[in-house]
Amino acid sequence: MWYNDLSGDNMKLSINRIIYTIVAFLSVLFLIFIISTNMVPLKYLLLLFVIFILYDVGLLFLLFKKHKIKNIIGYVLSGILVIIMGVLFYYLNITVGFFKGFGTNKYKEENYLVLVLNDSRYESLNDLSNIGYTSNELSNIDEALTKLNEKITIQNVKYDNNVELFEDLINKEIDSVFIEESSMSLIYEQNEEYNGKFRTIYTINIKTEIEITKETDVTNQPFTVYISGIDSYGSISTVSRSDVNMIATVNPKTKQVLLISIPRDYYVQLRGTTGYKDKLTHAGLYGVETSVGTLEDLLDVEINYYARVNFSSLEQIVDALGGVDVYSKYTFTTSPSAGGTYYFTEGYNHMNGKQALAFSRERKKLPISAGGDRGRGVNQQAVIDGIIRKATSPAIITGYSKILSSLNGTFQTNMSDNDIQKLIKMQLNDMASWNITSYSLDGTDGSEYTYSYPTQKLYVMKPIEETVTEAQGLIDKVIAGELLESSYDKEATDVNDPVYVEPKPSPEPEGPTIIGELPVISFDETPLIMIKGTIIDLLSDVTVTDKEDGTLKPTLTFNGLPFTDTSIFLEGTNIITYSVTDSDNNTVTKNRKIVVKLDLNGDGIPDDDISTPSE
């Protein structure tokens, strides 16, 4: 009996030793992991170290006493500690994984399209004998032509401008044109009669590394960030016009942020060009480095970093934060074209993603005193203030993992993960509120020829030099450590909820009136790959979300005609248009790329001789 009891005690002691060893080992590993993240301030590391030491000492006392109750308490505390470490490890691992992607997506994508007339006989590159194009100093079309000529021998015809280029295509003097996708959107905007006249039979994708390396010590030295909001949904790395142009000068010592908004139509000299000036928004057509260089020249400032977001990004960021409180200088109602009709009151408004986007995009419905595009810039600054205030508040902790997973891939920046981790560590150490000051450049309305569209005068805003000089002075003050007058309250008070307003139909409507929430057509944005001659189900992964009717099915249009079983996909890139109309007669359309490849071997695997948007 004595032998059996002793054996039981020894076995129990051995199990307790194993439990304690495992818990102590995990504690050491956890502390090493936390230190390696470089995000936790020293004072919190020391506190954690003391807590773990005391905890382990307590477990040592409880597990190695021959006392049943104390042993049970030791088991429970061991389990609690392991669970706590597991939860903290999970959150920290998500954080580290999220920030590891920062600064890695430093390239721009350009999609060069081979366009032919919609009613032409041309179905593939092999049917063409020539192709027309235009070129300038900022374009990568020469590289794209080189890739195209590797696929097929074809006569390249260079034109001085796009007007002559497309006139010759329409008059069938040339077979096709070669043009970058975002530049084509500008041509469609200025020539509405072109819509529906052309189709794409081939796409060349060019990826170019963005070379902007002006890193600094972000926790000790002032730095400047270019914030670009591009006028599109989808891939964040694709070149596009920059609808939002903002400079944020940050002084981490004084906790001062200066937001300077520059109107999208500001008439400036694009970096690397001669001759005509251009709208600032057009700089985005040539890549973020052109926008950065242009603004450096305008404001005489060194820009260290950039951050690009699109319409999808803003919605996701605001929704991931659980909504933000944004200050509105005016009482106004947004229009359907801004993304929805919402009534905002003067003062603070609590906004979700859709509301924040409509608030940021609206300019025509703002009061005359707001100044149209100038007022829109003020609203965009207010949204950024709301995002910063929410992101640096304790409220962010409750939705931490959801926020990080939602933000993945929603923006592009050259700021490294190390810089971001330093900023987080500084904020956790200081828990300081930031002083945010906003300023907007101003100008006068005008009409001028532009570098990107030299054959027709476009609306531009000519800079008022006094506002440019004032902005330069404010930047110098922030860099020198001066604290500016805040443009916003430290905390949002008397917050209103925006009210959805049903749009009133005009007596002579210029277009369809949007009533209620628009339906949403969803599918994988990656171009769909198929083998020529095969049949695929184009509706299998398509969903339609509608507030009132969950049974809506999209109709398909191909080359301007209803899609049927007899429709023939062309080799290269095809565009299918999905369309739905809800019970309020609101119609929504969305395009999808179908890339058709050959399978000469008959092995069911597409050949690699067709360029795709993912090259």
Image: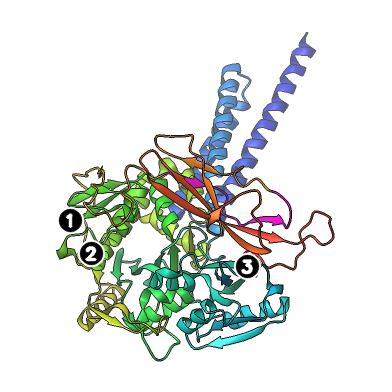
Residue ID for mark 3: 201
Whole-percent x, y for residue 135 in the image: 53, 85
Most foreground residue, 285 or 320: 285
Q: Residue furthest bottom?
A: 275
Amino acid type shown at disc 1: Tyr
Q: Quadrant of residue 80?
A: top right
Whole-percent x, y for residue 297 in the image: 36, 84
Amino acid type shown at disc 3: Ile
The magenta span reads 519-535
Q: Earlier in the sequence, mark 1 or mark 3?
A: 3
Q: Earlier in the sequence, mark 1 or mark 2?
A: 1
The reply to whether residue 386 is visible in this rendering is no
Dot 3, crowdedness within 10 Å: few (<14), some or many (≥20)? Answer: many
Q: What's the CA distance linking mark 1 and mark 2? A: 9 Å
Mark 1–mark 3 CB contact (< 8 Å): no
The residue tagged with tag 1: helix, strand or loop?
loop
The residue tagged with tag 2: helix, strand or loop?
helix
The reply to whether residue 579 is visible in this rendering is yes
The numbered dot on residue 330 is 1
Whole-percent x, y for residue 157 in the image: 59, 86
Dot 1, crowdedness within 10 Å: few (<14), some or many (≥20)? Answer: some
The residue tagged with tag 3: helix, strand or loop?
strand
Amino acid type shown at disc 2: Gly
Residue ID for mark 2: 375
Q: Residue at x 30, y 72 (%)?
A: 263
